[in-house]
Image (cartoon, coloured by chain):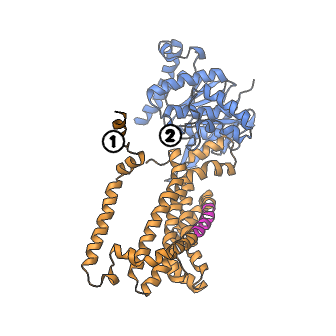
Amino acid sequence: MTRSSEAAPVRKPQSRQWRRFVRGGGVELVLLILGILFLWSVISQNIPNPSRYLPSPVSVVLSSYDVIWKGLLPNYIGQTLWRLVIGSVIGLLLGIPFGIALGLNRTVSDMFYPIMNFFQSISGIAILPIIVVWWGNSEKTVFVVILYTCFFPIAFNVLTGVRSTPMILVNALRTLGASRIRIVKDVLIPSAMPHIATGARLGIGYAWRAVIAGEMLAGRRGLGWMIFTAQDADLTAQVILGMVMIGVIWIMIDRFALRPIEADTIQRWGLVQR
Amino acid sequence: MPAKLVVDRLSHHYPDEYTGEDVHALDQVSLSVEDGEFSAVVGPSGCGKTTLLNILAGLLPHTEGSVQVDGKEVQGPGPDRGVVFQEHAILPWRTVARNIGHGLEIQGIPKSEREQKVQEFIDLVGLSGFEERYPHELSGGMKQRCALARTLCANPVVMLMDEPFAAVDAQTRITLQEELNRIAIATRKTILFITHNVDEAAFLGDRCFIFSRRPGKLKATVKIDVPREKRIWKDLLSEKAYTDPRDEILRLVREEVFDDEE
């Protein structure tokens, strides 16, 4: 008796993560991705010379065997991520204080607002040619482009955040006898946090595009460089592999690095509703 | 005993934000509030009540006349005058306890001493158990209790209140009015309370200052001789010592409102 009850199939309780995945539309997403891969395969099978124009998903993986297993791909990804991290960290360190400083004075911020908006609209790719003229095809050029690309959206959003702080909060602190520095620390910076987070996410997102473009024109190694050289060598599969990696890595950066920061601070304060 | 708050022939003009026309907000206002007195300022909307409060708080510079707190001329904001604003003036990123202790933090009071004081005022306004909550988790009434405790905790000489219960629902407002009365008894604070609600002004005020419409002038002063301990809504509504001055205030305010409509 005891044996049979032991042998009875125990229904495994569904894990919480699984239920969240299902409820969040995870199943549909997986089906959608499979659908896209299927469609891609079908197209690839029905065109002439697919290995040049559109290799199928399977052959992308197979023909990239070398790149993946010889450690070249991890190496390139590491190189690209390293450039992104250094560039964005410097961009944040410069952009946040700059945005706050501009936001403190109404006249100064009114003056700079259109200028910041102007530069924010000129993408890093658009300034790349002039940077190459100045510094050539060097590592410096890549960094300058990343830095430029993330600095302006970050500074611009921080400035907007500081400017949109409710006056009543500033006045409340003033009537408590707060100094200017304390108002910056206790009111303006926390109040600008949603904009700072947005700016960081936007800025780093733009920087991710810029680093790829920069590597294509001026870098050595890295994902952008890999795509560019693969195209030269007629290795379309590797070009596609590089593109897919760019998208996948960005989703992981956003999901595991940028969103948690936002959730940790802003949602707890009730500043954004989800 | 000299008055805690003295306003002497205060006038205020400012250019309208859109038209640029000169707006005459306050005209030769003189009033004083005694130590421990609860005064209410009541008048139609646009009579310069909020302008008056902003000048008293030091948020708006005054050009004509003088404002003195404890014998000192007001120049800019300072911790001697605490302000309770209409709404949304507590910091969303600070817990209830940290909001309430903010004034003491600014004054540089050490943490241990601060915590004890903060707890005292949390208990006084009835927010025990909500110390670690964030404002977005509180009801409108609780937010205003928190704002009130923050101002009280900084121990100002004069407390200025700018229609603090205007945004809460009617039921909560009645409760908050009775609570504020209880707190006024407990702390003996000198208070200037601004409202457009006649019942509220008469319920809370020892004296009511009635303002005319723009340019705001002090039109009349009405005394309400009801002991603080007796100020409970269910008893007061049939009390002549309350209803008579209340009706008088209502008449005076209505004159201003109806003048405007004709």
Pointer 1 residue: A9
Q: Which residues fall within the magenta stretch?
A: A85-98
What is chain B's hue in the picture? blue
Chain A display color: orange
Does residue B13 show up magenta in the picture? no
Amino acid identity at mark 2: His
- Chain letter of the residue beneath label 1 in the structure image: A
Q: Callout 1, which amino acid?
A: Pro
Classify 10 Å Cα crowding around label 1: few (below 14), some (14-19), many (20 and above).
few
B64 versus A34 height, above or below: above
Q: Quadrant of the N terminus of chain B?
A: top right
Where does the image place residue B182, in percent across and percent down from the top left?
A: 59, 21
Q: Is residue A144 left or right of residue A259?
A: right
Q: Measured along the vertical axis of the image, is residue B137 above or below residue A44?
A: above
Residue at the extreme left: A46
The answer to which quarter of the image holds residue B133 is: top right
Which label number is shown at residue B136?
A: 2
The Cα atoms of the two marked residues, 1 and 2, are separated by 48 Å
The rendered magenta stretch, by its main secondary structure, is classed as helix
